[in-house]
Amino acid sequence: MEQPQPSAEPQSPPGTGKPPLRVGMVGYAFMGAAHSQGWRTAGRVFDLPRQPVLAVLCGRDGAAARTAADRLGWAAVETDWRALIARDDVDLVDICTPGDSHAEIALAALAAGKHVLCEKPLANTVDEAVTMTRAADEAYGRGRLAMVGFNYRRVPATALARRMVADGRLGTLRHVRVAYLQDWLTDPGFPLTWRLRKELAGSGALGDLGAHIVDLAQYLAGERLAGVSALTETFVRERPLPGGAGSGLTAMPAAGTGTVTVDDAALFTGRFASGALASFEATRYATGRKNALRIELNGERGSLCFDLERLNELWFHDATDPGAEAGFRRILVTEPDHPYIDAWWPPGHGLGYEHTFVHQVRDLVHAIDEGRRPDPSFADGLQVQRVLAAVEESAGKNSVYTPVAD
Ligand code: SOE
C-alpha cells in the first residue's frame, strides 16, 4: 500500500472549520479522466464549503495507475479497490469502472462510511440497483450521501431548460423528443471492447446513451415515464477481439473474433404520467454524429430545444408571442444569472463537456456539506434502471407496451 504523498490540492477555506473532502477514485480511463477534471477544478472556480483533495487513485495495473495519477493529479495509488475503501484518509469513493463492479464497490464503500459518487448507469441490473438504493438510504441515516453521475443535468443550458419548464414557460407538456447519436461503432472491424459485452456493460447503446436521455427527459419534464414500447437491434454481431486494454471507445483489434452481446441501437416511445408522449433514440451507428444528444420539449405555451454539440445554446419558442413575431430564438446561455455561469467567464465565452463534471462536483460537495440528499440520488438511478429494463422487456416482446414497475 502506497502512502499518500503531500498534496498540492487547496485546503478548505481558512476559518470555515470544515475539513477537506478526500476523494478516492476507482478507474482512470475516459470517465476517470473526466471526473478528475471535476475534482481538480471545482474548488478553484466555485466557493466550496469543503475543498476536494484528489487523495487516491485505484487501478489494477500499478504502473499504469501511477502514470495516470501523475497526469490527472492524484496523490497516492492503490491497486485493489478494497484497500482504497479501507483507508481512513478517504471520505468519498468515486466509481468510474464498467457497470459490472458498481454494485460491489458502492455497497462496500457505503458500509465503510464513505460518501459515494457512481457513474451512470447506476448498475447493470434492477436487482443490483435496488440493493444499492437500499444501502444508500441506510447510509443517508448515518450522514453519508450517494449520488449517480448523470452529468448532462449540469450543462448550464439544460439546467436553464429545467428552470423554464418548472416555471411554467411551456405550460402543459405534450411532447418530449430525444435522440443520442454517436458513430464510433460503424466500422465492423472495431474490436469487442467491454462496452459490447453484456456481462461487463449490462447493455449497449441503451445503458450507455439511453440512460442519459431517459434521465434528462424526466429531469427536464419534471415527471417520470409511466411506460414504454421499444425496439432494439444489434447490427454487427461478431467483432474482432481487442488487443490490450482500451477505454472501451478505442482499442486495437487482435486475432480471433467474439460475439457482441449487447444492443447497438435502441428506439422507444414512452408516455409520461401526465399523458405527454415521448420518443427516444440511442445509437452508436449514426454516421457523422459524434456526441449528438438532442432534446426538444413541446408544451401548450412554448417549446425548448437543445443540442449537446452546441451546448452553450438553448432555443426557445414562446407560443404566446404575437403570431407575426413568433419563432424560435436562441438564448446564449453564458450570462451570469444562468445556472453555474456566475463563477466562470464573461458573457459569450462559453463552456464545454468537461465543465459538466466540475458542476457535478460543486453540487455534490454542497449536498454533503448541507447533509441533503444529492440530486440525482441512487433512487433516481434505480428509476432510470427500471425504465431501461422495461425497454428491454418490451423489445423482447417485439413492441408490446410495458408498464414501468414501481
Ligand atoms: C460513450 O458512449 C460515452 O462516453 C458515454 O459512456 C458517456 O456517458 C457519454 O457522456 C459520452 O459517450
Image (cartoon, helix red, strand yellow):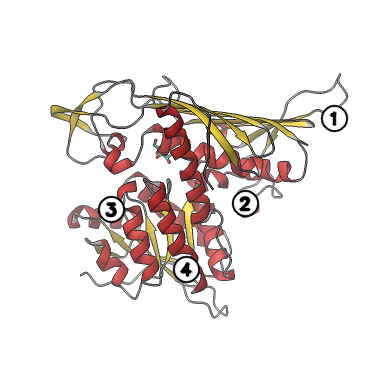
Q: Which residue is mark 3?
A: 68
Q: Amino acid at mark 1?
A: Thr
**Height in image: 53 above or below 96?**
below
User: Which numbered disc, 1 or 3, marks the residue that appears first in the sequence?
Assistant: 3
Number of residues whose C-alpha sits closer than 10 Å to that of mark 1, classed few (under 14), some (14–19) or many (20 or more): few
Q: CA distance from mark 1 to mark 3?
A: 53 Å
Residue 238 has which mark? Answer: none
**Around disc 2, counting alpha carbons within 10 Å, would you say few (fewer than 14), some (14 to 19), or many (20 or more)?**
many
Badge 4 density bin: few <14, some 14–19, many ≥20, Cα 10 Å = some
Q: Amino acid at mark 3?
A: Ala
Asked if the residues shown at circle 2 and circle 3 are in contact, with their CB atoms under 8 angstroms apart, the answer is no
Question: Is tag 4's residue or tag 1's residue first in the polypeptide sequence?
Answer: 4
Residue behind mark 4: 138
Q: Which residue is mark 2?
A: 340
Callout 3 secondary element: helix
C-alpha separation, residue under disc 4 versus residue under disc 3: 34 Å
Q: Give me the disc on residue 320.
A: 1
Give the amino acid type for the residue marked by disc 4 in the picture: Glu
Residue at the image point whose x is 54% and y is 58% from the top: 362
Question: Going from the N terminus, do you reach mark 4 or mark 3 first?
Answer: 3
- Lower sequence index among marks 2 and 3: 3
